[in-house]
Structure formats: C-alpha cells, structure tokens
Image: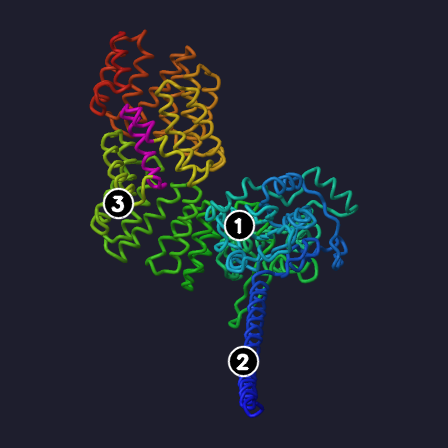
Amino acid sequence: MALLEAPVSWRLIAAALVFAVFCGSELDKWHTRRIEQREAEQQEQHAREAAESAWKRAAEDCLQIWPAPPIRDVDPYKHLGVARSLLAGSFTQVGDLVPPYVERDIDQWARERLQSSGAVLLIGTPASGVTRSAYQLALTAPASSVALIPTGPQGLATALGELDVLSRLPSGARPLLWLGGIDSFTPGLTSAMLRRCRERPGMRIVATISSTQYEVWEAENRLLAEEFGEPRLLKRVPSAQELKRAEAAYPGVEFSEGIAAAFTVAAELLKQLHSGDGTCPYERVGDDCALAREVVDIAIGWASTDIGRPLPISQLSVLAQQRMGGPKINGEHLERALIWTIAPVVGSASLLVRETDSKGREFVTARTDIVEIRRAESGGPDEAVWLAALDAAACVDDREAIGRIGFRAHIEGKMNIASQTWAMVTALDDPAVASLWRAMAFSHGRHEPAGEVPLLERLLELTEATFDPDHREVARLLTRLGIAWLELGKPANAQEPLERALTVQEREYGPNDPEVALTLNNLGNVRCDQGKPDEARKLYERALTILEREYGPNHPEVALTLNNLGRVWRDLGELDAAEKALEWALPILEREYGPNHRVVASSLHNLGNVRCDQGKPDEARKLYERALTIREREYGPNHPEVAATLNILGRVWRDLGELDAAEEVLERALTILEREYAPNHPEVARTLGTLGNVRSDRGKPDEARKLYERALTIQEREYGPNHPEVAATLNNLGTELLLQEPAKARKLYERALNILRSHFPDGHPMIAIVERNLRDL
C-alpha cells in the first residue's frame, strides 16, 4: 500500500508547486499592475495639478486678484483706480487710509438701481470722483460679495468664457464685476456676455466711464449700453447739498473746483487758470495777463483736436497773435506767459510742460487732466486751432493724426473741419480711412443720417476709385447711402443708389440672395415714400419670398419685411391683410430684439395705424404710447422719430375727441421737426396738416387754412403736384373753404380725387372720403 501511495504524494507536491508558481506569477502581475496603476494615478494627479496650476495662472492673468477677494478687502487705489487723495491745503499724502466719503446726490439712485437691476453705469465728468463713488457703491453690496476685476477686454472675455471663473467661486459667494472705465473693455465685452452675467443670481455689475468718452462709446456699443438702462452723470462742480456735506466733513477745505478735485492737484491748477497771472510786468497793475490765458487755452485746444503731438511754440505764437490782434506780441511777454504756464503749483504739476527736441525746437504740452476737464465743459478749440493742427499733421504726413482730427471734429459737430479732413484722405489704404469709417459708425449709432451721408459719399468715391463702379463693395456702400437718404426723408435721393446697388447684387449674388432682398425692401420704402404703394408691395413680396425660403417663416428679417408689407397693405386699403402681416411680425420682433427695441416701436406704430383705420382709436392710442416710450428712451425726447410718434398720437387723440391732448403733442412734434430738419421739410408738412385738423375741430378755420396752405406749398415742392400727400392736404383745405368759397372747394376736391385715382384702386378709403365730400357740396 505504501508503494502505491507515494506517486500520489509526489503528484500533490507537483501540483502544489505548479499552483505556487502560478500564484507567484499572478502576484507579480498584480504587483506590476498595482505599480502601473499608482503611476497612472500619479500621472493623472500631476496632470490635474498642472492643469489646475495652468488654470490658476490664466485666471491670475485675466483678473487682477485671484482667488476673488471680498470687495471690502480690495485696495481701491491699487486695484480699482481710485485716485489717491491729497489733503487740501498742505497736500500731505494720506497714506493707505481711505478718507471719509462725501455723499453725492446720485448715490441713493445708484444703490437702488444696483439692488433692483444688478447693474449700474456711472458717467463722470473729469475730476468728478466717479471712481470713488463707484467704489462706495460696490461696498453697499452684500457682505458675501467677492470682486472680479478684469485686466482688460480679452482678460474679461477669457475669464467669463473659457475659464468660467464664476463656477470656481466658493459656495454662497456673490460675484461683483468691476468695470472701471468700461470703454477699455470694448471690444471684448458684449451685450450677450453682460446679459449672461446679469442672469446669475446675486451678481452685481458696477461700471464707470468718463463723460468725454461716453458719447462715442455709447454710439459704438448701443446694445451693451442698453443693458445698463439709463445712466446717471456725476458732475465735477458740487450741488448746494453736496457742498454742505463736503464742508461738514472737511471744515476749512475749499470746494469751488469740485469735491474730488479739491483733493488733487487739478483744483490748484484750475484756480491758477481762473485767476491768471496777476504779477505779469507787461500788464497794468491789478490786471491779469490775457496773453497767458490765451497761451493755455490754445495749448489745451491743440490737445483737444486729438493730434497727439506737442504744440510748437512757433505755432503757438502765431495762433496767439491771431487771437490777440493788435500790435505784434512782444517776444519777452510771450516768454513771461510761458514761464507762468509751466511754473509748478504743487510738486511738479503745472498747466503746461515745455520741452526741446534734438534740433533745438521748443514745444509745449497741456496737462492731460486739465485738457479733459476743459473738453467736457467748453465748446472746444476754435477754427484756427483746428486748421493749424490739421496742417501740422499734414506737413509731416501723419495719417493717423489726420484721421483722429477728422473723427474728433466730426463728433464735436465741427463739420467744416471734418469735411476738410476727409478731403485729404485719398485712398482706401490710407490709415486715416479707419477714422472715416469710425465717424460714419458714430453717426449711424446715434441715428444721425445727416452726419452719415457725406461720410458715405466720400467712402463711396474712394471705393469706386479703388475697385470698379460695379463692385460688390460699392454696392454695399450704395445700399447704406440709400438707407441714410431714406432716414433723412429724401426718397428721391435714395432711389438712384439703391437701384444701382440692386443691379450689382443681382449680377454678383443672383436674383434670390438675401442681399438682394435687403435692397428690395429699401427700394420698397422709397416707393412708399413716393406715394407708389402698389409698386412697393411687389418689391416687398419679392423680398419676402427670398427671405422665407432662406431663413424660414419666423426669422427677424422675415418679420421686418412683413412689417413693411403690413404698412403698404394698409396704404392700399387692405386692412385685413395689413393686420395679418403686422400681427405675425410683432411677436417675432419682440422675441428677437426685446420688447423695448426701436424696431418693435416701428411695428407698434404700423399696427396702431391699422387700428385707427379700423375705427379702434383707443387700441391705437395704447400702441402709439408704448412706441413713444420706446423711442423717447432710444433716441431722446427731441428726436425726429419721437416727433413722428407724437404726430400720429395727436391724430388719435383728435379721433378720441381729446383736442387739448392732441394739440399739445402736435405742437411738441412741430417744434422738434422744425429744429431738426427745417421749416420746409415734408415731415413738418405732415404735422402741419394734422395740427390744421385740430384747429378746424376747435372752430378756428382761418388758423387751419393757414396751416394747410403752408403744408401744401411744402408738399408740392417736395413731391410734385400729383402725390397722395398733396391730395390729402387739398381735401382738408377744400373742407375749410367749403362754406366761404364752395366753388374753390369743389376744384380742390376734384384735383384731390384725380390724384388719388391715379394711385389707388376704386373703393380706397381716401377716395371714398373725397367722393363723399364732393357729393355733400
């Protein structure tokens, strides 16, 4: 038996050995896998740490401080741009302490706006202390607020987009986005980006901008500006209430030059400028030096042209002589004036800085903060300074400076200077062309077609000289020029450029391209304004077919065309078709642009007209009043677009029997239009006609007749003798003459009827009115 069992034991031992070898092998494999797994985990950890480190470095590049600190821990001088104050009188450095804040009149409004809407934009005149006021506003945010302070436009875009820093904030932290000098963040910051920020619960946005920059920034960034709602202006010179608070907080400090300025060298420099040089030996005892004043004023004006070059003293002498007139200025007197202007009042601060170049030529440069203060508060340079700066830039062929001068002249309303500047731009590759485009965009953004037209015409000349007259770039400019003429109420001027553009676009893009549809729409507007509604309808319908096929039925471009089509259907007396088109368009436009956009106002206007014609004046009134609110906010209270709504609102108040309300809004409209256009503009004629109707209803036929006759003179000259607007006025004038001169009234009615029958089909509401008047004779 023992001999038989031995082999079994050896087999067991062998199996055990095999198993042990197997286990050892598996253990080695497991150990190897474990090592590899640990190495992989370590690599992943290193990768995560490297990514986190790279993310942190990127965040630190994009934001002044990361992690985002509580707003109360932020150094306002180092990180927010608050000017470090000097104690008035002794001008001793305060150090790191923030001196007591003087409450400004706009502060309560700003706190309420920040709490209710989450975003505030403060506009400050130079030396007004707007950055300090914005800092105090930021401190009113909840204690959990942490500051996000971008380093620039790309830093802001990267921080909010690619890095998504908002998702990295601690739980419960409320971000406060600081945009001090918001113009330095555009381009880069967009309205969509700002809207996403505002949608985050608990987020606050505090922004500032100088009043000298706001006008241009707002025109170039209209949608972004709208996100803040109505801004407020902080002025340099304090109100009576602000002055009381300042004197109580700082007894003995003199605040005549402003609260913020009192703690900077600006106040001392302004005092020097206002007081003049009372010790000038070339003046009578007790007089200040008129020459010294002129020297400073000329130097400030020179800098205000944006030439970007110091003023040669030789040129300064010439300009001073032109201003002073009389005998030639004594060279020693001029030198004395210069010494006074460069004498430091505090430390190294002086009104002007004098320097000499390598060739021994002497120049002066005005102090930047004083230039900005004067730019905000004065009428700007006189023509001689503008022309001298332009000539100086041209002499050294500084094309960028020429462009800057042209742009500054344009936005300052110095159109004669701007026109001379643009005449010096001779080719599309001239660096000054960038400023020409910018000036055009400025006027477009401010809805000022009168400013756009000459710029577009100059750009068109340059583009035609560079390309050929039938180039697609020429067509784009022709389209924009036609639109500008339309907005000026000059359809005859708009027709030729738009027809030229259409010919080019159809050849370049084909007859069914969206660019073609845009021009068709604008040509339809021309036909409407020319009193040719059926021709306009055909153009709109062709544009609609193109756009619906290209974009679908709910696209905003489709809605805009429907809006036009609704207007023309109404002109043709097809009120059901007009109502259908306009009610389809309105919700699309509200969804795309928001309920308070100017495009929505136009659609409301057109729908109100239909409601009027349907005999629903109260419904029309509500639509017009909503449109008026939008346009007053969009354009300001004295814009022609506002006047157009006031005019039609006057008509509906008249329909409702509210003659006082009608007369009030019509007189306001007339004042705006006569000032903005001219007393003989067709829009003025339209308002004269509506106001004449009100005077007639008030039983003042003589006043009504005079208004109608003035309107008729304008319309016949502007449109010719056979326009529907002329017919409407002839009808109204006939009604006023009906009792006193029935034979003359009949002739007026007959002439009106002939005009209308040449434009509209039988049964049109306007034809029916005149026919009824003739029957009643």
Query: How far, Cα to Cα, is label 3 from label 1?
Result: 37 Å
Query: What residue do we see at 74% from left, 39% from top?
Result: 244
Direction bottom: furthest residue = 3
User: Considering only order in the chain, which callout, 2 or 3, is on the residue closer to the N terminus?
Assistant: 2
Q: Nearer the viewer, mark 3 or mark 2?
A: 2
> Does 283 sit left or right of 698 as displayed?
right
Instruction: Give 549 or 428, whichever is nearer the viewer.
Output: 549
User: Residue 621 lies in magenta, yes or no?
Assistant: no
User: Considering only order in the chain, which callout, 1 or 3, is on the residue closer to the N terminus?
Assistant: 1
Q: Is the magenta stretch mostly helix, strand or loop?
A: helix
Numbered tag placed on residue 213 in the rendering: 1
The amino acid type of the residue labelled 1 equals Gln
The C terminus, quarter of image: top left
Q: Which of marks 2 and 1 is in front?
A: 2
Numbered tag placed on residue 516 in the rendering: 3
Direction right: furthest residue = 251
Question: Residue 330, image x and y in percent?
Answer: 57, 58
Query: How far, Cα to Cα, is label 2 from label 1?
Result: 76 Å
Residue 317 in view, yes or no: no
Question: Residue 595, image x and y in percent?
Answer: 46, 36
Q: Residue 116's image quarter?
A: top right
The amino acid type of the residue labelled 2 equals Glu
User: Residue 577 lies in magenta, yes or no?
Assistant: yes
Instruction: Give 571 or 419, whichever is nearer the viewer.
Output: 571
Residue corresponding to mark 2: 26
Q: Look at the image and give the residue range highlighted in magenta.
A: 554-581
Question: Residue 247, image x and y in percent?
Answer: 76, 43
